[in-house]
Image (cartoon, grey):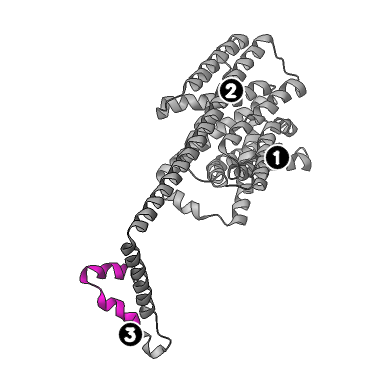
Amino acid sequence: MKSESEQRAGLLYGIGAYGMWGLVPLFWPLLKPAGSVEILAHRMVWSLAVVGIALLALKRWGWIRELIRSPRKLGLIAVAATVITVNWGLYIWSVNTGHVVEASLGYFINPLVTIAMGVLLLKERLRPAQWAAVGIGLAAVVVLAIGYGQPPWISLTLAFSFAVYGLVKKKVNIGGLESLAAETAIQFLPALAFLLWLSADGGSTFGAQGGGHAALLAATGLVTAIPLVCFGAAAIRVPLSTLGLLQYLAPVFQFLLGVVYFHEAMPAERWAGFALVWLALTCLTWDALRTARRSKAEAARAIAQAKAQLQAQERVEVEALAKDPARVQAQVQAQVQAQVEVQALAPAQNPATAQAPAQAPAARLSPKDAPAAAAGSPAGD
């Protein structure tokens, strides 16, 4: 069980990770006049550099050999790199073109999309509250589509791309830094080629807008890696249910920035759609917390039953021994005899006679016991 100080540190790491993801819309406009594709390419290149330095400092390279030897995992990493490229690029474009609120909606409905994918792809069975949440989420999409005059394609693309990304990462099952390093390694050459072409064509802003702007473009690697490191530190210190609640910090911050800071319009139908999404997430969170409490109670009950059964068995054995003194005496004699044999088999203090006692047990082994003795010997190791 984690100590209180570790859980408190994990909570702070989690708030830091999701807080940074929630405030990142403030960063992307600083990179203008660079276009979204140029920003995306810099993010790929500098992320690999930052993660590579981190792995070098931590001396965590053993996973590379295992990954190379697994074509299936390499293929899944390529899929993950592709969908996260779509997700990153669309998000940057959305923020820099005034669609922060719609982008936040994508991360609000991401848990609902993840559940729907679990049903459709993994054949998972949903509890009634989860079905209700998914149904309310679909109603929210319909209301928003009517309000926008078209489906909220930015939100849906962000939600589905991130859900696919999460599903693939679950299948690959490697650490966060390692996974990001592998994904950006796949992204690196196309991104670098684009940046070189853009520079040769005279369209690059890197260096052309001054050293400060170039430093900000290079900082995209830190903006990508630091929240991930904080998330990894939180994941090993706090319960999954806590992380599940913290994940809503990011879209909440993004939504508030879109409305309060960027002054994006929020007509009545958009408020109605968001209200339905929040209602769906409330159902989902309530169900998750209730299930976690129930599972914890069942585990505690099972442990208590096991302890009670063990104590009852011990009482039965004690009562049986109390009724049979001869049996108690026989067990005591057997223990004394075992101690005498152990002392007899102990190596003698005289080095000249140490070899004989060491060989004595082997001489008494039967032929069927010989393989077991060989397996436990240093030669068998």
Instruction: Specify the amino acid type for callout 2.
Output: Leu
* Local SS, label 1: helix
Looking at the image, tell me whether mark 3 or mark 1 is earlier in sequence order: 1
Q: Which mark is residue 217?
A: 1
Q: Residue 369 carries which label?
A: none
- Residue at 25%, 70% (x, y): give it: 370
Question: Mark 1 or mark 2, which has the lower sequence index?
Answer: 1
Q: Is residue 202 one of those drawn in magenta?
A: no
Q: Where is residue 130 in the image (x, y as percent from the top left)?
A: 50, 22
Relative horizontal placement of residue 268, taking residue 357 as reference (left or right): right
In this rendering, the answer to whether 239 lies above or below 90 is below
Q: What residue type is labelled 3?
A: Ala
Task: Report the front residue among 217 and 115.
Answer: 115
| Residue 365 is inside the magenta segment | yes
Q: Is the magenta stretch mostly helix, strand or loop?
A: helix
Hey, what amino acid is under mark 1? Leu
Q: Which residue is drawn at 69% across and 43% down?
A: 218
Q: Give the range drawn in magenta.
A: 356-375
Disc 1 versus disc 2: distance between alpha carbons?
35 Å
| Of the pair 221 and 33, the residue shown nearer to us | 221
**For this rendering, which residue is in front, 283 or 51?**
283
Residue appearing at x 38%, y 49% in the figure: 313
Residue with the mark numbered 2: 281
Count of numbered tags? 3
Corner quadrant of residue 241: top right
Q: Position of residue 17 (x, y in %)?
A: 66, 38
Q: In this view, does 190 lie above or below 105?
A: below
